[in-house]
Image (cartoon, rainbow, N blue to C red):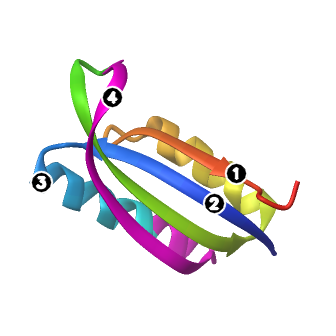
Amino acid sequence: MRNYEFTVIFDANDEKMKEGLAFVTDSLAKAGAQITKQDDLGIKTLAYQINKQDKGHYVYFELSADPASIAKLSHSFQLSTLVLKFLFVNPEK
């Protein structure tokens, strides 16, 4: 298990954000990741448009997970329409 910092951007629409957050947390739980911290950073203006969106709702996580499961989660999040952008970072490197 390695520690990761994970930031995800959802649609600024409240309903879509809640649906996306439920999808992400369920996916993390199914992959066996242990969330140690979750912080809602709120709605921010994006530096550039993503899927014709000017604003996004940011959520930050700190978690522990197996590196193989991170690769599977990344693929799943790339295919999802609920997630605008995401980034996994290993702070130990």
- Give the crowd class for mark 2: few <14, some 14-19, many >=20 residues within 10 Å: some
The span picked out in magenta is: 27-49
Pointer 1 with pointer 4, Cβ within 8 A: no
SS under mark 2? strand
User: Which residue is label 3 attached to?
Assistant: 14
Callout count:
4
- Residue 57 in the image, given as x and y percentages of width and height: 28, 47
SS under mark 3? helix
Vertical placement of 79 versus 51: above or below?
A: below
User: Which residue is label 2 attached to?
Assistant: 5
Q: Which label lies toward us, 4 or 3?
A: 4
Q: Residue shown at 36%/17% (left/top)?
A: 48
SS under mark 1? strand
Q: What type is the residue that disc 3 sits on? A: Asp
Q: CA distance from mark 2 to mark 4?
A: 20 Å
Q: What type is the residue that disc 1 sits on? A: Val
- Residue 47 in the image, given as x and y percentages of width and height: 38, 22
Q: What type is the residue that disc 4 sits on? A: Leu
Residue 67 on the magenta segment: no
Q: CA distance from mark 1 to mark 4?
A: 20 Å
Q: CA distance from mark 4 to mark 3?
A: 17 Å
Q: CA distance from mark 2 to mark 3?
A: 24 Å
Give the side of residue 31 with respect to residue 48, left or right: right
